[in-house]
Amino acid sequence: MIHSILIANRGEIASRIIRSCKKMGIRSVAIFSEADRDALFVQEADTAVYIGKSNPQASYLNQEKILDICKQHQIDALHPGYGFLSENATFARKCQEAGITFIGPHPKAIEEMGSKSNAKAIMKAHEVPVIPGYQGEDQSVATLTKAAEEIGFPVLLKATAGGGGKGMRIVQKPEEVAQAIEAAKREAQNAFGDDELIIEKYIASGRHIEFQILGDQHGNTLHILERECTIQRRYQKVIEESPSPALTPELRTQMGKAAVKAAKALQYDNAGTVEFIFDDQSQQFYFLEVNTRLQVEHPVTEEVTGLDLVQLQIQVAEGNPLTIKQEDIQSKGYAVECRLYAEDARNDFLPVTGTIQQWKTPEVEGLRIETAIQSGAQISMFYDPMIAKIIVWDQDRMVAHRKMHYTLRNLLCLGITTNQDFLAQLFATPAINQGQYDTHYLANHFDYGLLQNTNQAANYPAGIAAALYDWQQRESKRSVLKHLPSGWRSNFYEHQKVNYDIEGQEEELSIQYRHIGQQQFEFIKPVADHSSSNGEEKPSIEKSRVKLIDTPPNQVSFELDGVRYLFHIAKNQPHYFLRNEKLGGFTFALKDRLPEKEVEKVKGGYEAPMPSQIIKVLVSQGQSVKSGEGLVVLSSMKMENTITADEDGVVEEVYIEDGQNIEAGVLLLSVKSTVGSS
């Protein structure tokens, strides 16, 4: 029997494994890096051991150090979670050699499926349908380019190791192949330590459907139904659900049998996932890959079946035969999951870092939150930006979607920019509610303009909330002249003025405290008057009477024009993070009354949009570049981003070098424009 488990991972999956360990009476041992010293999963574990610096290579990917800790603390078994070392066959073997039970499939299965090219060959041999493509040892750019041309464009480049969209590129035409191959190889090498690629015929309209599989060490194998993960951005899953709205009972049976056939071909002996691409036009499905680990979205399956997949993983790893049979697996109701990320949906979903000052989830029947976040948690540049997984179960699919939308409107994650409003908008989209989408729905059909906060009517109460919050903070600190009204002026009619920058738009408010003891205010807002006969805008003002209702900690409630508003607020001078259930989230800054002179921008300069590591400088001083050409490759939170040239020019200066860690706003290089020159 297993008595102790080291969790070679971090964040929410570490917390999830710890829960099952406690349930089974197994001692949990967490490892943590410098950045994770105060993380919730570290507090939850029975034992926690410092492993190294924040960089994953020095901590969560340091195999020898992890094995040393196992030896020092008499560990029976190791659970790798997902990501990091979870699909590393060499590490699984090292665990076995050290007498540590690796909670996952046997190393040979990991090795065989670790190469997508080898996986396709095995599946083809066992009559599992596969997509036409190239997989081979010759990884030269010339060979890959020739293969892409033979398959026919568009094609999909895909790293044979790992997943999560890393090392993947769609190539539409021949002239894009070479650069795409280099970028995909580099990203795959950085993420998985392996740059091998395969090429597949790109299916333009498909659905991503995966089957949970489970096997034991006695030859028993079964599937635990499907999850649909079609809603994706840049190959990253956004929404996962079960059952799939696209599958008929007959199709479910066919795909389930194919998944079991794939598992048996590998003599699979733990939890895993067989992924398929389903063409809903032809009703054909094709094998994509086997994930030889627990999936991020495994709670969806747990919610519809009532099974604890982590517990089953541990029991199988102990050598116990499966006690459930295929006919025992029944789906009850419907479950949906979405992923809350620290990323700015209004700025091309760039990842962000910072401190979560307020974290609170609403009470909704059927709601399950998987996270290792609490108020005060830090989001660092070193790891994936996922904050939490939000899962909702209900008997009815549409009701579950409605509950998810309600949850996303009321969940509090303040102090950092997230994709929360983007997710809420998805669950208010009829096509998504009705299951009418393919893997390109977000790219081709979703209106990202809905995310831009251009609603002046919403900005106004948000600005009032911030002004009232600041007023209350000042009032609570007043120790003298309390008999005078707040904001008193010798000229009674002069209002206090405050200016906010709300998502790039300036909001000017004037405030005057009108009724002592009743906490009533008059707000004045400048507005444009278009009623003049010549069509010119005339400055005008809008006056509002506002009554402050209550200011509990980090909240403000007030009445404006007969409507009551409640805003939750976190402040990190000079930035405000606000959320209102109806109006959504706001991030804005208080403009300084005596602003410092802005640092003059370097003409033609390119700045880092986020805290990053410089992966590769693609240009050198004096080099000519074309518009759209790559300049610098940055990596932040395990994802690469390429800074491209805005226009034709010549590189004047390069201020950074490969491997350098930088903060947001750092000047990377400057390019002198040649547009218009002879």
Image (cartoon, helix red, strand yellow):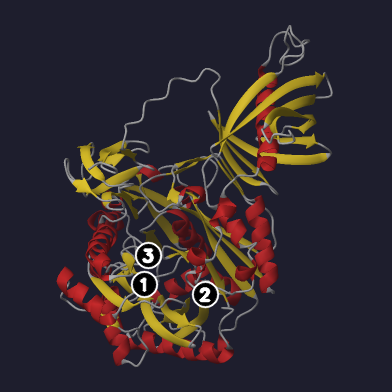
Asked if residue 123 is positioned above or below residue 25 in the image, the reply reads: below
Instruction: Using the image, tell me which numbered label, if any, was put on residue 442.
Output: none
Report the amino acid beneath label 2.
Glu
Q: Nearer the viewer, residue 659 or 256?
A: 659
Residue 165 got which mark? 3
Residue pictured at 36% horizontal, 74% vertical: 292
User: Residue visible at 82% across and 18% down?
Assistant: 516
The structure residue drawn at horizontal position 28% and vertical position 73%, both measured from the top left corner, is: 114
Image disc number at residue 104: 1
Front label number (1 vs 2):
2
Q: CA distance from mark 1 to mark 3?
A: 22 Å
Give how far apart the Cα atoms at labels 2 and 3 are: 16 Å
Q: Name the residue carrying label 2.
A: 228
What kind of residue is marked 1?
A: Gly
Quadrant where the image shows the N terminus: bottom left
* Mark 2 crowdedness (10 Å alpha carbons): few <14, some 14-19, many ≥20: many
